[in-house]
Image (cartoon, grey):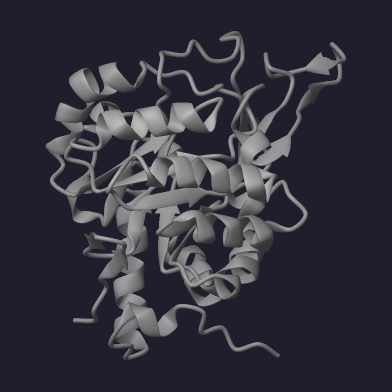
Amino acid sequence: MSDLTVQIGAMTMKNPVMIASGIFGYGDEFLGLAPYGELGALVLKTVTLEPRRGNPPACRTAETPAGMVNAIGLENVGVKAFLRDKLPAALSYGTNLIASLAGETAEEFAACARILDDAPLAALELNISCPNVKSGGMAFGVDPAASAAVVAAVRAATTKPIIAKLTPNVTDLAAVARACEAAGADALSLTNTFAAMVIDVERRCPILGANTGGLSGPAIRPAAVYRVFQVAPAVGLPVIGMGGIWNASDALEFILAGASAVAVGTALYADPAAAHRVLSGIRDYLTRHQVARLGDLVGAVNLR
């Protein structure tokens, strides 16, 4: 059997396949649908210091060719209720759990991290890239200094591994990545959704209640792979690739481009076992190609 383990700071994953934050909720919604404990890690729904109502509920998602646009607006129960009411059920999966944090200031991120520092979580992911909120979110991710400030504040507040989740909606993504590394991040995840808009031409108005949202799904995969290819050689950190992964071939594109691990998100809407199909396919690929270690494939694309 090939070695599939991935190391991110103090967190050891038994394989490189993760569930991306958002689609999976807090984990309780997917109980019994698939053996998620077999995966390397589960990233739970983003939480903030205080509960958030999110964007207008009239229409928060819109299907598009090869993808979907969402504008949930980080609706969540707040970090204290997450710790008290949601985390216990997720612990039953028996694999690494990663909390996703957001805030309108670096201090809010740090406050969340302090509350969760003693919780049975393997790592913290910092959502500095959500395009669906008016304050915080992508406003941090497009600015290297602001991104670094969030990472540094959280680094001072926790001993857990820190994963900075980056936005694709920026000119120089490598600069943001390097700033996060310098501030103390243990890994990077990319990408979050691409800023997008869907218009009802008959009514001449946006379909989404928030007017704009974030595009995910297979439509963004080539662009997300390219951003992993840009960022991975620019830093000395593990990169977690995501964006439209539907099968093992999709995941292997990210790995060959430089990702040490991958995360499955939107595909779970169509198939709750999609991540398991990805993992099985990666195993088969390593066997067919006689690759002893997954790490030997990371960044191994043969450029022309």
Q: Is residue 30 left or right of residue 109?
A: left
Horizontal and vertical percent position of residue 24: 36, 35
Image quadrant for the C terminus? Answer: bottom right
Using the image, determine if residue 246 lies above or below residue 93.
below
Towards the viewer: 40 or 62: 40
Using the image, determine if residue 1 lies above or below residue 60.
below
Q: Residue at x 55, y 28 (%)?
A: 105
Q: Quadrant of residue 45?
A: top left
Q: Residue at x 67, y 35 (%)?
A: 139
Q: Quadrant of residue 291?
A: bottom left
Horizontal and vertical percent position of residue 192: 57, 45
Horizontal and vertical percent position of residue 166: 57, 49
Q: Is residue 104 left or right of residue 158?
A: right
Using the image, determine if residue 207 lies above or below residue 58.
below
Q: Residue at x 74, y 19 (%)?
A: 211
Horizontal and vertical percent position of residue 261: 40, 63
Q: Residue at x 41, y 15 (%)?
A: 50
Towards the viewer: 291 or 172: 172
Whether residue 192 is visible here, answered yes or no, is: no
Image quadrant for the N terminus? Answer: bottom left
